[in-house]
Image: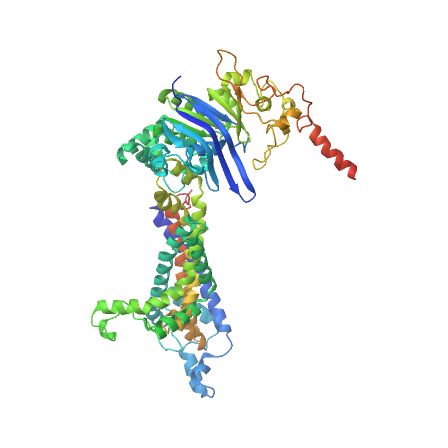
Amino acid sequence: MSEPLLSVRDLKTQFFTEDGTVRAVDGISFDVNEGEIVGLVGESGAGKSVATSSILRLVDSPGEIVGGEIEFKGETIFGLEADDDGELRPRDEMLTEEEMRKQIRGREIAIIFQDPMESLNPVFTVGGQLREFIEINRGLDPDEAKAEAIDMLREVGIPAPESRYDEYPHQFSGGMRQRVLIAMALACQPDLIIADEPTTALDVTVEGEILEMVTDLQEKYGTSFIWVTHDMSVVAEICDRVNVMYLGEIIEQAEVDDLFYDTKHPYTSALLDSMPRPDRTVDELRPIEGVMPEAIDPPSGCRFHSRCPEAREVCREVHPEPRDLSEEGEALHTAACVKHDAFDVGYDESPPIDTQATGGFSAGFTETGGEAE
Amino acid sequence: MSLLRYTLRRFAQAIPVLIGIVTITFFLANQIPGDPVEIMLGPTPAQEQVEAIRARYGLDRPIYVRYFTYLSGVATGDLGLSIYYDRPVLEMIMLRLPVTLLLMLSAFAFAIVTAIPLGVISAKRRNEPADHVSRIVSLIGVSTPSFWIGLVLIIVFAFYLGWFPARGLVLPWANPADVRGAATQLEVLRQSAHHLFLPMIALGTLQMAQITRIERSSMVDSLQGEYVKLARAYGVPESTIVRKHAFQVAQLPVITIIGLGLSTALGGAVLTETVFEIQGMGRLIITAINNQDYELIMGTTLVFGVVYVVGVILTDITYSYLDPRVTYGED
């Protein structure tokens, strides 16, 4: 197999706040191959957006990438090495901030943000903003960049692009603005586009149109995508491979069909079960019990054990690293759950524990509250 | 052109405001206890003298007649006759207004030129030493009265150091023949700048401090905007982001504060002119009030009102020019 376009290894990004260190991304690894749409799925707060901003090295203070490696087309976006005193320092071949800005951001890796209403600058014309990014990232002169911008607006389905070029963002609807942001990303002709929940803020019909358009354009340009979302139906529609994140970790990684039909991690199953479907009524929906714990103080052992319906004593003690669970000849399918035999830590012998999902947790709380009266 | 129509409409809308100002000042001024004729003639005037003067200034007529006479006068540009100076009020104002406008414009120029870079640097280097210095400077600026700053400036830079004159003002367009020690217009200009420097700082410090604070907080907001993140993610250089992407959005609240600052600056001008003995509108108002010169009180107040209203309209126009989301109300 050829080298992946982007390879992320054991990436750790932490936020140093007054309340303590938030381990927003805690050792994730994944690859993106050429021409592939890779999903990054998880609830709010799982660390998806921090992971993507880490790839561009645009983590806002007080956040910092503290470990791991990011390689893109043979270039080192991030990498540390120990010096003679054992102190970690950036490797010599790691791109400088200036190189990141000039070579990578926009030019090689472009991003589409979640909120189309806020992402465009309200005081500049849509065309002007598009043209500026094209000029910077493709080295075109202003006239060429303008022509390119108008072509790209037409490509993403904006009617009358010549006249809309001179309009301001507030004159565009949410869906149209998201199309503009997609045009921005494509117009810079990057090899990788990070789409950070680009359809979350849109209504479903617009979302459908945009997904369809992206799939078409992806085929046409062959661009790779990292598609960040919390919506499993979007994943099903658009992704080739999927990474499921929970509390800063990737807990399952598989090709999209395997993930849906041969789910290996209880969290992924829970996500799929919480998805509304036409063949199920609202009563039959099974939302995931409890809320995701804070990344500042993650639970011991498996981080999902406090909400997991299949949790056992061992889950509280053993922290599973993802392992390949695929059979011979199958595509890679990793999961981090000790219930699989590959882990062999005595799950089957371990007694079940009370969790929020099994009902024990909340019942316990009510009981103490009741008796105190 | 819709901007022109918008401007004209805004000025037309200002007319009722100005009528209101005239009405309120007219009746307030006439409510001040005492009598201008008495002030003029001393404690024991002859009865005929009093009546003659009252008749000359129209003070013998009933108040409502005087009100309507005054209102129609204002409409035709006649602001009446100053009782104290015995000259047309308009003439006095035309003499003094340019002085005050010069002082105010230079104070605002000083404030804007210093405050905007200071605020931007402060926002860019948030919670670093530069930010703390700028915070302390603007805190002192906001909490110090302009007359006190004026006095300190006079003591330090005029008396002890002797760098600047302590009093008076030379107008830059004055005839060199009328200005002592100036043979050419260039020397007049130099003298003018020399005189203007201390009062400009005394009057401009408060504005500078306020604008700095607003500029900082507005830039901090705008630098955290999604559009700034987007620009960074597309490799736009940080300097361009600060100068262009973040800056232009951040100026909208700043414009509002500058517009509102006009009213405090008008009040400040009265004090600054007194401290520096500058013959401007502020001193004219004080003379008018001290001598119960009805026509002059009303005339100067009206002019201050006009300056303020024009300032507000200019603010709105600038706003609609800078922010494409503001329409001219022609939906």
Q: In which quadrant of the rendered image does the C terminus of chain A lie?
A: top right
* Percent of width and height locating residue A329: 48, 11
A305 is higher (above) or lower (below) than B39: above
Residue at 48% across / 72% down in the picture? B29
Q: Is residue A254 left or right of residue B287?
A: right
Residue at 44% across / 47% down in the picture? B220
Question: Quadrant of the rendered structure where residue B182 is?
Answer: bottom left
Q: Is residue A355 left or right of residue A172?
A: right
Q: Considering depth in this image, is B177 or B38 the residue closer to the camera?
A: B177
* Percent of width and height locating residue B192: 29, 68
* Percent of width and height locating residue A337: 58, 22
Q: In which quadrant of the rendered image does the N terminus of chain A lie?
A: top left
Residue at 25% across / 74% down in the picture? B179
Question: Quadrant of the rendered structure where residue B224 is?
Answer: top left
Residue B169 seen: yes
* Percent of width and height locating residue A125: 36, 39
Q: Considering depth in this image, is A17 or B70 the residue closer to the camera?
A: A17
Q: Is residue A145 left or right of residue A241?
A: left
Give the farthest residue toward the front: A84
Question: Quadrant of the rendered structure where residue B298 is?
Answer: bottom left
Residue B71 seen: no
